[in-house]
Amino acid sequence: MLGKKEEALDSFYSFASKLDTYETAVKDKHLSYYSKYLQGTFHFIRFETRRMGNAMQLMLYNNFHLNIKEIGATGGGAHKFASMWDTVLGITMSKQGEMDSLVAGMQFVLCDIEGECYTFKPVKDSPVANPPRSSERTDERQPRVDQWWTSKKVQREPVTSDPYPYLLVSIGTGVSILRVDGPRKHERISGSTIGGGTYWGLCRLLTGSDSFSAVLDLASKGDPTKIDMMVGDIYGEGSNALEKLGLKSDIVASSFGKLVTKQNPSEGIKEEDLARALLLMVTNNIGQVAHLNAKLYKTSRIYFVGTFLQHNIISQQRLAYSIDYWSQGKMEALFLEHEAYFGALGAFLLNHGIEHKNQAVPPTKTRKRRQSRASFTHQRSKSMGSVQFQL
């Protein structure tokens, strides 16, 4: 019996290490890492929720269901698909609280990985820090930009002295805002219905993109100033009034507001312009809600996580700008490399009773073998829910 179990584990480890893609599965190879505390390697593979059937077929094809009796699971999928998994695969989903899993996964990774946390800062020497005025532009497609559009990634070390409280903003289909007061101690204090689902849903109406990653690629080419009404459009870029108001000409006055002034609002507008302007509108709204909550709860650190931010540098840069702008530099937006997988990782940790003690005391040999060698995760790519599979 022990031989079969060891064989099954080795088969799973080999699969997790070698798999790049499987039909609609995506493996984020750059996120795989070795945990010194658990003495094993985590691998991260995701499916969209609508592709749950593919995830189950993957389990069946590799006979993983023959050796897995229970998995940690969180999010809506833990309830929606529990009966199906039990019937088809014979696997029980051990349901974990969604926000509990999110916080547990995040706090474990912050203790376990160096260089996990980062933010964005403007590149002061970049030519876009002082963009040319309209009369000086030679390219009609050149947008008015601010220095944050080319802001660079800057690593941040975890705060070890008096790290609490801080805000955790999870952006998936909607937005949830938590105040974290200690290790696995948190409270949901706010949220918003305007999140990643809002953006992707509207983009499906406004563009021909067939996936979230495709529409992000489209947005990277867009010029939002063709759609958004800027402060400079109202006052003129050289107006003395701007100095009195303390505003810059490149600040958005009204998202999509420029279309109101055009006889034919679609004239000269491309899909990429719509995708970019919409992305900034949703992101700015999330940033403002987060800032107001941080101000209310008197914390200067705001961690942004969630599948909406995965491979979404535009929103990360805009959130960094928004928090810095509204707080006048007193607050900072922080991001994490594994932001899309904290729920899945947390479900695994909670299901096995693992908590990072940040000390050199390894788990027992049995726990090390069963819990740390590999993690195969399903993650909803357009919402916050996640399901975690573990041998």
Image (cartoon, rainbow, N blue to C red):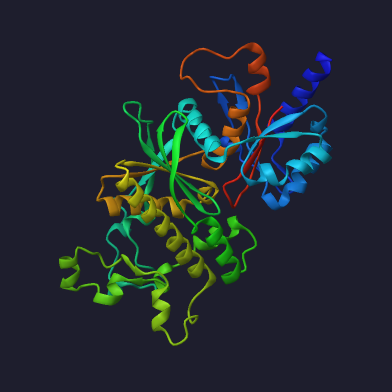
Horizontal side of residue 92 vs 193, given as left or right: right
On the image, the x and y values in percent for residue 78 come to 67, 41
On the image, the x and y values in percent for residue 66 come to 83, 29
Residue at the spot x=35%, y=49% of the render? 293
Of all residues, the one furthest to the bottom in this rendering is 263
Residue 4 position by quadrant: top right
Residue at the spot x=59%, y=28% of the render? 349
Quarter of the image that includes the N terminus: top right
How many labels, in total?
0
Residue at the spot x=31%, y=41% of the render? 300
Residues 32 and 38: in front is: 38
Q: Is residue 268 visible?
A: yes
On the image, the x and y values in percent for residue 299 come to 31, 41
On the image, the x and y values in percent for residue 117 come to 42, 36
Q: Is residue 64 above or below residue 171?
A: above
Q: Is residue 377 above or below residue 257?
A: above
Residue at the spot x=56%, y=36% of the render? 31
Residues 327 and 188: in front is: 188
Horizontal side of residue 143 vs 134, given as left or right: right
Residue 65 position by quadrant: top right
Quarter of the image that includes the C terminus: top right
Residues 138 and 195: in front is: 195
Q: Is residue 125 visible?
A: no
Q: Is residue 171 above or below residue 165?
A: below
Residues 189 and 390: in front is: 189
